[in-house]
Image: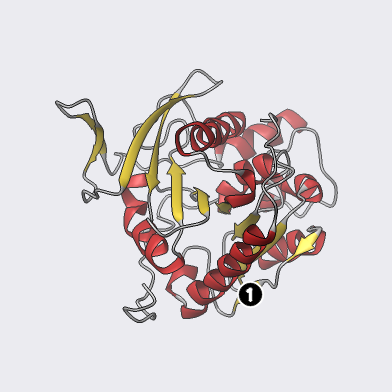
Amino acid sequence: MGNVTSNVAARFAFFPPDPPAYEVVKEEDGRVVLRGVTADNNMDVHVLDTKGGNKIIATFWRNPVARLTLLYSHGNATDLGQMHELFMELRSHLRVNIMSYDYSGYGASTGKPTEFNTYYDIEAVYNCLKKEYGVKQEDLIVYGQSVGSGPTLHLASRLKKLGGVVLHSAILSGLRVLYPVKMTFWFDIFKNIDKIRHVNCPVLVIHGTDDEIVEWSHGKKLWELAKEKYDPLWVEGGRHCNLETFPEYIRHLRKFIQAMEKISITKPAKQLSSTPSITESQNCKCLRLKVKHTASKKES
């Protein structure tokens, strides 16, 4: 029964867009660019090798006045090509750098999407941030939406000096999306309910009260289990794929980023350690949504 349930959970875990919303192209000068995505002089494209043997695509969106960097793990049924407008909005409104990536088997990333491949994927991206951009744990906020909460909490539970965590429409575990189980089984996937207990930094939870894919109770429980709770955002009437369209989303997220900036400024520099949907519908193109322009020109 366990193997059957595990296979069912895994089968419903990933829905890569088909075809991908972009292509990877190598220019004559050797630079890698994304065809199908609006060109941006402050965006770098990386092709990263993972421990799983795959090559994944990652993008770094640079904000010249940023102190913090957001490592964003996107939701299901989307890829970097569909996400770029949202990243441009967040980079501007939050004044952060944004690093994001496509999981193995998503977009132009090679391999197959599996739970453990997403862990290898985010580890490769984190290593890139350290080596290529000198990003410190204290100046890093990891952000996971929906299925992206799995790799996000995997990394967050291992980094002891991390700046912060954002969980957006997050899941308690894969099996708990499918069945209202009360205990964690060995064959479950993305055991966020256990990993959240090992996160040692402020955690912001954002969840819609009318989420039709991942019940609000998932976000509420994760917030309750967090060691360092930041004021949660329960979006009244919010569903699984539309929270970015609510004005309170960007306001609350900006408030969290500003609070983390203050903490980052007051903390002394420390040496980094070396430690390194799930039933979602294929028609749910999560995060192909624009943030409403509620801020003034001066704020952006």
Q: Residues within 10 Å of mark 1 (few under 14, many from 20)?
A: many
The residue lying at 70 percent from left, 52 percent from top is: 268
Q: Quadrant of residue 35?
A: top left
Specify the farthest residue to the front.
Answer: 268
Q: Is residue 82 visible?
A: yes
Q: Secondary structure at mark 1?
A: strand
Q: Quadrant of the N terminus?
A: top right
The residue that mark 1 highlights is: 234
Q: How is the image coloured?
A: secondary structure
Q: From the viewer's perspective, is 73 left or right of 3?
A: left
Q: Is residue 112 left or right of residue 5?
A: left
Q: Residue at x 51, y 73 (%)?
A: 249
> 199 left or right of 269?
right
Instruction: State the residue lying farthest toward the top.
Output: 53
- For image coordinates 71% across by 46% down, the residue present is 161
Give whichever of 61, 18 is nearer the camera.
Answer: 61
Looking at this view, is 278 or 253 the one in front?
Answer: 253
Image coords of residue 81 (percent x, y) = 31, 47
Residue type highlighted by circle 1 = Trp
